[in-house]
Image (spheres, helix red, strand yellow):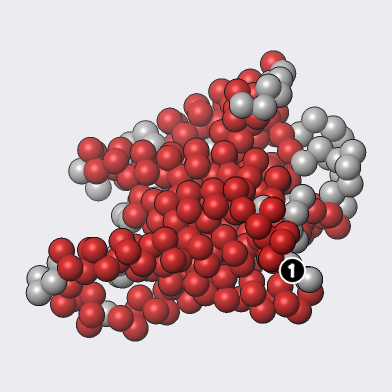
């Protein structure tokens, strides 16, 4: 059981790593296309990438009891995919719009800190859903928030419209994590991931044509960041998230996924030669410590 927990934790850690690198792709992509266009193309691409995987898995499981159970539970799968896709659309779109609204002299790292607040929102929402949250997890959450503050906030924290939009995106991502937590034990993870991408992409297409003026030339110019965001960030990472979250405490999952901001900072340091200050390195260390702390066994729970 412990081995399975570490296996799923590794999946979520890899997810956070891919998302952290994707931050560069998202930033570059925004130089060519607008938020809804970027999200529409990358989400649909992510769904398309998973279709061959689903076909292959279906052939391998043809006639098995597991495959028959999947067919019987198709309604749950579709419902979960629609809800996950809607939450994913809300979170990713609000985040992209908020970042685009920041002025040139505003530290975009502030958006990373605000988005990471889902590590607080998830356990709070989880209490309403009767999810157990141990003392070590709460301590890890508080330590992680402190770490993200040192990592991302480099100026006096002031509230502006863009901050509120990114915060709304953090709320949507919190719902996304909890929705996945509910459906991941009731439906096939890869199929669920595929459906959510197509739902997110279709909704994004609607808003793209309603509010933006996309061109094939601009999309082609952004092909490299879109390919990475679509294949790796969507097709691979979000699927790993769904598989990794199965039977995982959603608060611990949110802490692992929040390492995205740490990996993005480290990627900027290693790949783009951006320097990390002592304050930022301290933030990285605190977040890693929080992840380890949150996964320690809950002694109070073990007594029963």
Residue plotted at (90% across, 38% down): 105
Farthest residue to the front: give it.
Answer: 217
Nearest the viewer among 219 and 123 is 219
Residue that mark 1 sits on: 214
Where does residue 139 sit, x and y in percent of width and height? 52, 36
Where does residue 30 sit, x and y in percent of width and height? 73, 52
Where does residue 193 sit, x and y in percent of width and height? 41, 64
Classed neighbour count for the residue bearing mark 1: other residues with Cα under 10 Å, few (<14), some (14–19), many (≥20): some
Q: Quadrant of the N terminus?
A: top left
Nearest the viewer among 135 and 5 is 5
Q: Does 123 appear above or below 178? A: above
> Residue 182 occupies which quadrant of the picture?
bottom left
**140 with respect to 149 (left or right):** left
Where does residue 175 sit, x and y in percent of width and height? 55, 64
Mark 1, secondary structure of its residue: loop
Residue plotted at (51% across, 50% down): 233
| Residue 168 in sight here | no
Nearest the viewer among 40 and 279 is 40
Farthest residue to the top: give it.
Answer: 278
**55 with respect to 21 (left or right):** left
Q: Does 15 appear above or below 279? A: below
| Residue 278 in sight here | yes
Residue plotted at (50% across, 38% down): 17
Residue plotted at (34% across, 83% down): 75
**98 with respect to 180 (left or right):** right
């Amino acid at each position: 059981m412990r081995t399975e927990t570490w296996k799923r934790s590794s999946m979520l850690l890899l997810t956070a790593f891919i998302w952290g690198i994707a931050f560069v792709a998202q930033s570059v992509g925004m130089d060519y296309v607008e938020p809804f266009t970027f999200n529409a193309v990358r989400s649909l691409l992510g769904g398309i990438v998973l279709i061959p995987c689903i076909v292959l898995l279906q052939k391998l499981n043809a006639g098995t009891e597991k495959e028959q159970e999947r067919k019987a539970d198709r309604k749950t799968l579709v419902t979960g995919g629609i809800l996950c896709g809607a939450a994913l659309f809300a979170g990713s779109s609000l985040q992209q719009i908020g970042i685009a609204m920041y002025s040139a002299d505003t530290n975009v790292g502030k958006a990373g800190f605000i988005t990471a607040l889902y590590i607080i929102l998830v356990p709070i929402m989880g209490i309403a859903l009767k999810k157990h949250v141990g003392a070590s997890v709460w301590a890890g959450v508080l330590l992680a928030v402190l770490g993200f503050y040192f990592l991302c906030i480099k100026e006096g924290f002031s509230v502006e419209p863009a901050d509120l939009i990114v915060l709304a995106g953090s709320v949507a991502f919190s719902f996304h994590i909890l929705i996945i937590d509910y459906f991941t034990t009731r439906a096939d993870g890869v199929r669920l991931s595929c459906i959510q991408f197509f739902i997110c992409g279709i909704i994004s297409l609607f808003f793209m044509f309603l509010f933006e003026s996309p061109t094939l030339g601009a999309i082609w110019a952004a092909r490299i960041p879109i390919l990475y965001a679509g294949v790796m960030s969507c097709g691979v990472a979000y699927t790993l998230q769904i598989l990794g979250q199965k039977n995982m405490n959603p608060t611990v999952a949110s802490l692992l996924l929040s390492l995205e901001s740490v990996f993005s900072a480290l990627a900027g340091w290693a790949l783009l030669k951006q320097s990390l200050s002592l304050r930022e390195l301290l933030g990285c260390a605190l977040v890693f410590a929080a992840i380890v702390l949150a996964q320690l066994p809950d002694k109070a729970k073990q007594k029963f």
